[in-house]
Amino acid sequence: MVLNQAESLLLVSLAAAILPSLSRLLRLPAPVMEILFGVILGKSFLQVQFSGEWIQFLAHLGFLLLMFHAGMEIDFGMLLKQSRGKLAFQLLIFGATLGLSFLATLYLGSGMFMALVLTTTSLGLVMPTIKELGVQKSPFGQSILIAASLADFLTLFGITFFILWRDYGLGWHFISPIPLFIGFGIILWAGRLWVWWNPERAEKFLGSQDTQELGVRLSLALLFLFVAVSELVHLEPVLGAFLGGCVLSFVFREKGELESKLSALGFGFLIPIFFINVGVEFDLTNVLRPGQLHFTIKLLFLAILVKFIPSLLFTLQRISIRAAMKAGILLSARLSLIMAAAEIGLEEGLISPAMKDSIVLLALLTCLLGPTLFKLLQRPGTDNPVGTT
């Protein structure tokens, strides 16, 4: 069944408004509910197709806003407070995850790109989960947050440079992102300096007194500025969107109200359209083929393992082995970044449509299993599980 553009917009808009309430009723994350709705609607079951360009445009805009929010979730204040030794330790954990992911892809017969896919995590799932349990200020919670932040940040850079290396080798194009990163650094420095010297104006941008919504306008301008520059230097636009969010997070440390306004725009409408569209494009028959189903089961098992094993290194920081195991379970949860990786991989011809569908299913399962098991294993009175093994 083919819906015209008006019918498509009406159906998706109503779904974006109703599904959050249904997800709360069923105790499922809203993105999972939106993807499942798209799965039922799309190629897997009802075979509904959206005509026109509006849904694709809004879904792509929602995708960019999702990555912008992913950048905003990076807590640079927390990262800068860490000692060099602690950051080096977290880089060791990331390196161990990447190494195990590479071994896993050799076993699966996949390429280096899939190793980067398996290295992803979801700070957007990790952060609210540990906040809900009240452990975000403990050494345990801080270790998980730093691990998730570095995984998000470094994996996206790894994907970017891998694609540049594949397309252009180690020539001029491989270092073409340097002007973007230099500009990124200058904007970070200048923005932070401006906030330091103009705290009252910065507060006006962030607070309820911003009647003209200058903070929202500045944020969206940053998003599209970095997306445009990324396009000019032949980088993935998602990297630009992510960097734009990082700039906002670094410059405005107390950004709660502004973040709430941007969430209303993003998670209130545009990002749900992206998740619904992901579900519509998902083809369950691709995954249920005997060979692909076997691959997907192995992929799920290895995706948890490559996070679980390196997390045992947390015991070297006087975190109990039980807590380290819980950290590995939570860090195995994936959503926004793995979706971005799947979209990029399919667009670049690095993965097949069937493999992309396996990655989407992996995201759905891990974003349900990770936080749920973590909450079940988190016992009262273990907010700071340090020193007992």
Image (spheres, rainbow, N blue to C red):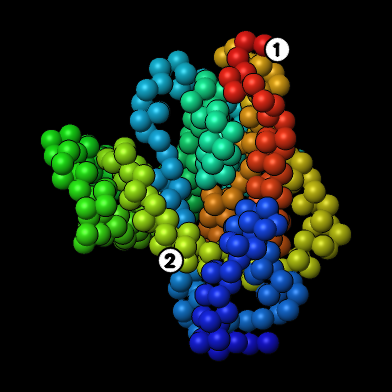
Quarter the C terminus occupies: top right
Above or below 79: residue 68? below
The residue at the far left in this view is 197
| Among the 4 quarters of the image, the one containing residue 175 | top left
- Find the distance from the CA under tag 1 to the CA under tag 2: 47 Å
Left or right placement of residue 199 versus residue 246 in this view: left
The residue at the far right in this view is 290
Q: Residue beneath label 1, please?
A: 389
Amino acid type at circle 1 is Thr
Residue visible at 68% across and 75% down in the picture: 41
In x, y percent, where is residue 255?
33, 43
| Among the 4 quarters of the image, the one containing residue 50 | bottom right
Q: Residue beneath label 2, please?
A: 61
Residue visible at 55% across and 31% down in the picture: 134
In x, y percent, where is residue 358?
71, 56
Amino acid type at circle 2 is Leu
Residue visible at 48% across and 36% down in the picture: 149
The mark closer to the camera, 1 or 2, is 1
Does the residue at mark 1 contact the one at mark 2 (Cβ under 8 Å)?
Answer: no
- Residue 176 tag number: none
Neighbourhood count class around disc 2 (C-alpha, 10 Å): few under 14, some 14–19, many 20 upward: some
**Secondary structure beneath label 2:** helix
